[in-house]
Amino acid sequence: MAAGCAIPTRRIRRRRWNQVQRFQYVVARALRYGVLRLKDFEGDAHFDPEIVRLLDLTMASPHPDMADDAEHQWGAEVIVTLKDGRRLARRVDNLVAGAAITR
C-alpha cells in the first residue's frame, strides 16, 4: 500500500468525514466484526470503543497499482501488519455485483 496519513479519530466529527475516513471506518468494522450492517452507520455506532481503537491504527491511501482512470474501479487491497511484524493481505482487483466475498 502506498504511504498515507493516519487520521486521528479524536478529531473526526461524524458528519464531516471525508472519503478516506469513511473507508477507514468500513475497514475497521469489517476487520473487527467480519461483516457490515446498516446499523453500523446509524446513531452512535461510530463511537464503538473497539472501532475507535482500530481507527487510530488504520491508514488508507490510493493504491499504486490501481489507477483512478482504470477500466475497473472497484478494487482494493487490505494489508494488516501484526504486532510480530507478519503481514496479512487480501486484494480484490474488481469487486462486481454478486461476487462472493470470503475472509
Image: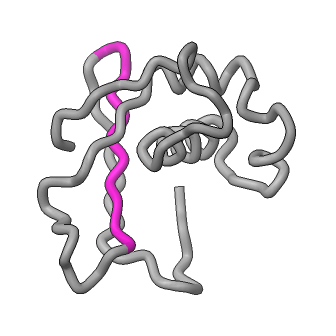
How was the colour assigned to the protein in this rendering? Answer: one colour
Asked if 46 appears above or below 62 in the picture, the reply is above
In the image, residue 75 lies in the stretch drawn in magenta: yes
Asked if 6 appears above or below 42 in the picture, the reply is above
- State the residue at coordinates (26%, 19%): 85
Near-viewer residue (87 or 3)? 3
Quarter occupied by the N terminus:
top left
In the image, residue 18 lies in the stretch drawn in magenta: no
Near-viewer residue (70 or 85)? 70
Task: Tell me how many marks there are.
Answer: 0
Find residue 47 and report its horizontal and vertical position in percent. 74, 24
Q: Quadrant of residue 57?
A: top left
> Would residue 45 be found to the left or right of residue 103 on screen?
right
- State the residue at coordinates (58%, 85%): 98
> Would residue 73 be found to the left or right of residue 20 on screen?
left
Q: Quadrant of residue 13?
A: top right
Q: Which residues are magenta?
A: 74-84
Find residue 19 and report its horizontal and vertical position in percent. 46, 49
Find residue 33 and report its horizontal and vertical position in percent. 69, 41
Near-viewer residue (100 or 36)? 36
- State the residue at coordinates (75%, 48%): 41
* Residue found farthest to the left: 64
- State the residue at coordinates (67%, 21%): 50
Q: Quadrant of residue 68?
A: bottom left
Asked if 85 appears above or below 46 in the picture, the reply is above
Find residue 34 and report its horizontal and vertical position in percent. 65, 47
